[in-house]
Image (tube, rainbow, N blue to C red):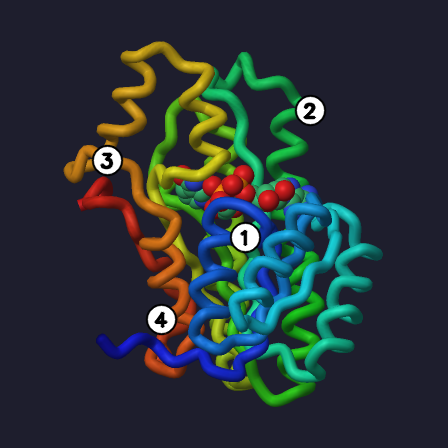
């Protein structure tokens, strides 16, 4: 089987220590990319990097909180020290909130979702766009969600943050197309990661069934299924695509 070629590309992944980010780090490293694993959980990022490197991969770990602009600046410096050129950044770090009607989501939780999921992407995009325009091109891949494309009852704060990410993706794609920087979003439905397992563990059987069976395939996505699409996006095979949202949802939006 031929796979999308990412050999030698330097790819930085925020939230890379867990779930979709970790699966992407493994897939990309196994195909010869130099992978930066940046995460709030620096220890987990480090141990994933060691695991990847022990299997012949080329990766490094960075500890970062994407809500802190100075830490983001340091993350980019650290990435530069590993490899001057940054080909791709995957803005994947994210949080969710427990399902509840809008009036019952507290203000702090709303702000936290906006801070991590939207402002975190904004800060990283600013740095990446400056570096990528200066180096002659690059690709920003923002992990949004189907909740960024349609109504998402009971997760209004999360949904608002992800709609924002889709908006940033489209606007920046148009602004920077001539600078040879592409910007795309990935929009999964429910995927089997610690984030979703955390929600499932707090729901009764009916609630769990609603989530697992929310798409026509009646199952959760696998992190690797998202990672494989991300790998294709990272490759030159997607070279004419910018400003798009790649939907991986088991048919949910069909
Ligand atoms: N799992 C799903 O069903 C699903 C569906 C659609 C979109 N997404 C999106 O995919 C992305 C990854 O989600 P996942 O399911 O793999 O979650 P996950 O919880 O397994 O991983 C998220 C990672 O982000 C890190 N993180 C959280 N806050 C951070 C911060 N402030 N700074 C740096 N890192 C931080 C966490 O430490 C963790 O390692 C998120 O943006 C999420 O919204 C997930």
Give the Cα separation between the discs numbered 1 and 2.
Answer: 21 Å
The residue where tag 4 is placed is 232
Label 3 with label 2: CB-CB less than 8 Å = no
At x 45%, y 70%, the residue is: 30
Q: How many marks?
A: 4
Farthest residue toward the bottom? Answer: 136
Q: Of the residues tagged 4 and 2, which is closer to the observer? A: 4
Marks 1 and 3, the one that precedes in the sequence: 1
The residue where tag 2 is placed is 108
**Circle 1 SS class:** loop
Give the Cα separation between the discs numbered 4 and 3.
Answer: 23 Å
Residue 203 appears anywhere in the view: yes
Horizontal placement of 74 versus 140: left or right? right
Q: Of the residues tagged 1 and 2, which is closer to the observer? A: 1
Give the Cα separation between the discs numbered 1 and 4.
Answer: 16 Å
The residue where tag 3 is placed is 219
The numbered mark at residue 236 is: none
Question: Residue 87's image quarter?
Answer: bottom right
């Amino acid at each position: 089987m031929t796979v999308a070629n990412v050999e030698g590309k330097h790819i930085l992944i925020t939230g890379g220590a867990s779930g979709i980010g970790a699966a992407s780090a493994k897939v990309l490293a196994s195909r010869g990319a130099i992978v930066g694993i940046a995460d709030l959980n620096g220890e987990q990022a480090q141990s994933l990097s060691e695991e990847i490197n022990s299997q012949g991969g080329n990766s490094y770990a960075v500890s970062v909180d994407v809500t802190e602009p100075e830490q983001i600046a340091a993350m980019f410096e650290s990435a530069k020290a590993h490899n001057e050129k940054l080909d791709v950044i995957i803005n994947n770090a994210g949080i969710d909130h427990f399902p509840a009607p809008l009036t019952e989501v507290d203000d702090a939780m709303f702000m936290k979702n906006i801070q991590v999921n939207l402002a975190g992407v904004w800060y990283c995009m600013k740095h990446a766009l400056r570096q990528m325009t200066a180096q002659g091109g690059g690709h920003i891949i923002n992990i949004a969600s189907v909740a960024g494309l349609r109504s998402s009852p009971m997760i209004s704060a999360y949904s608002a943050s992800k709609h924002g990410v889709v908006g940033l993706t489209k606007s920046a794609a148009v602004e920077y197309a001539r600078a040879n920087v592409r910007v795309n979003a990935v929009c999964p439905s429910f995927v089997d990661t610690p984030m979703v397992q955390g929600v499932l563990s707090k729901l009764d059987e009916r609630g769990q069934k609603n989530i697992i069976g929310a798409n026509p395939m009646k199952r959760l996505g696998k992190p690797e299924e998202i990672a494989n699409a991300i790998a294709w996006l990272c490759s030159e095979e997607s070279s004419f695509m910018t400003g798009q949202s790649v939907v991986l949802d088991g048919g949910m939006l069909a």
